[in-house]
Amino acid sequence: MSLYITNNKKWQIGILLIPGYNMAEMAHIVEPLKVANHALGRTVYDWQLFSLRGGALRSSCSMEMDTLPLSDNLALDRLDAMVVFAGRVENIYELPLKGFTPPLTRLANNGTFLGGVGTGSFYLYRAGLLDNCRWTIDHHHLGGIRQQGATPNHATFNVNNNRFTCQGGSTSLDMILHIIHLHHGKSLAITVAEEMNCGVLRTPKEHRLDNKISPYGWPNSLQQVASLMENNIDEPLSLSEISGYAGLGKRQIQRLFKVYIGISPSIYYLEKRLNHAHKLLFESELSVDAIAKHSGFSSLPSFYKCYKKRFGLPPLKARHQKALMWSA
């Protein structure tokens, strides 16, 4: 069975919940599937909730969901896919792992597609089920787990070799829209995205920088560099200047960004400036020229080029389109 399936295929999806799972992340997967069913006028996705022992399982927000136990082999064997949801933790190695590897391995041996959202990917990794594929994990733990020898990448999500993983948060919505696109085409995926008020179909390499990158778990040195950048948006500092202020070598700064964020310091800085410009464009009445200057761009053509590459539209057209949406 391929992830690129015919429109007539009905997928049975298991939702494996770990105590303290993130309810919002689960909704980002299930709700688009429900919308897809409604848009097509038939059930192409069905799902069932599982936990290790079954019964009511409490989420991070104290809501409870009824689940089937992983020992229900008849239910497991009917699944086309299983996706694991866990909660946010400070130390990922403290997640409860006992008892999960055998049923996950059984599913893998059955050819079931296996997915992980955020820290849920850790269960597949520890079960040895992410070998020979591209995968990612909750962005808070990317740097730490890579230092322990794991090889997650910095893409917001990955779909390959019967595996699908994402960094959690809103990237779970990006990933499921991508899968719906693979299953039923771009038109349905756009319809679902619009219904979910998402609006844009993202590829795995497109950063949701404001959601993706957080100083949680960063070393103090990296937090200091990031603060220098964020406090100098209108007059950007050079890497040499940042190096001097922070007391760090340029190569050391580049290495910190690569390990903990997955992009270069210059790209991070540019993203911050563009996001600042994007906010000013919609929340102020400043001219585009003034916005460019407030965001550290001395050249208006350069600002136009960078903004369009990041957001898909030139700034004036983006502002005009937003105004039309609000007046409709």
Image (cartoon, rainbow, N blue to C red):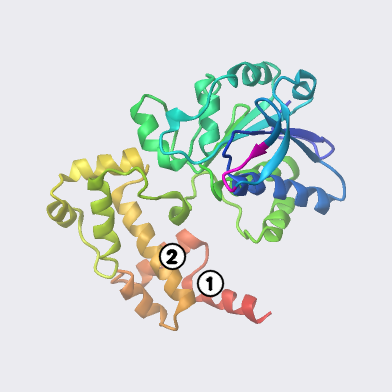
Circle 1 — which element? helix
Indicate the position of residue 19 as horizontal and vertical percent values.
59, 35
Find out whether residue 310 is within the magenta segment: no
Residue assigned mark 1:
318
> Which residue shows up at 20% across the image and 41% down it?
252
Left or right: 262, with 70 as reference point? left
Q: Tell me which segment is drawn in magenta.
A: 57-61
Question: CA gap, disc 2 to disc 1?
Answer: 10 Å
Q: Residue 76 appears in which quarter of the rendering? A: top right
What residue type is disc 1 on?
Ala
Q: Which quarter of the image is occupied by the N terminus?
A: top right
Counting residues from the start of the chain, the first of labels 2 and 1 encountered is: 2
Q: Which of 214 and 178 is in front in this view?
A: 214
Q: As drawn, is 218 to the left or to the right of 202?
A: left
Is residue 58 one of those drawn in magenta? yes
The residue identified by callout 2 is 307
How many other residues sit within 10 Å of disc 1, few (<14), some (14-19) or many (≥20)?
some
Residue 119: x, y in percent? 51, 36
